[in-house]
Amino acid sequence: MASHVEQAVAARLAAVQARRAQQRQDRAERAARRRAGVDAHNRAKLARLAAEQTAAANPVADGH
């Protein structure tokens, strides 16, 4: 049977491992959200650039 000291050490190690696992998961989730945001920003930028190029290539007559 393990002594109370060994049990305390094992409990502390388990707590550290659980905290580190949670931190890894949190970092992975933040990275995924950040990547999704960057991708959305890039898609919007490309759409805006495409619209600007289309507008520049096909000027609309302004009636003058």
Image: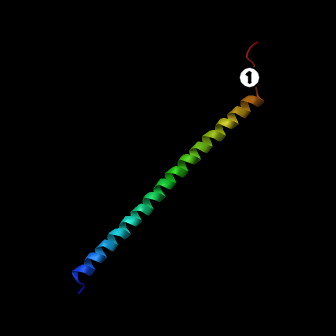
Q: Position of residue 21 (x, y in %)?
A: 41, 66
Front-most of residues 41 and 2: 2
Residue 22 found in image quarter: bottom left
Residue behind mark 1: 60
Q: Which residue is drawn at 48% across and 59% down?
A: 28
Q: Where 37 falls versus 11 (above or below)?
A: above
Quarter of the figure that contains the N terminus: bottom left
Residue 34 falls left or right of residue 21: right
Front-most of residues 54 and 18: 18
Q: Return the residue found at the far bottom.
A: 1
Quarter of the figure that contains the C terminus: top right
Q: Residue at x 47, y 54 (%)?
A: 30
Q: Position of residue 26 (x, y in %)?
A: 43, 58
Q: What's the amino acid at mark 1?
A: Val
Front-most of residues 63 and 2: 2
Secondary structure state at the residue bearing disc 1? loop
Q: Where 43 falls versus 3 (above or below)?
A: above
Residue 18 found in image quarter: bottom left
Residue 13 found in image quarter: bottom left
Q: Residue at x 66, y 41 (%)?
A: 46
Q: Where 53 falls versus 29 (above or below)?
A: above
Tag count in the figure? 1
Q: Residues within 10 Å of mark 1 (few under 14, many from 20)?
A: few
Residue 46 falls left or right of residue 28: right
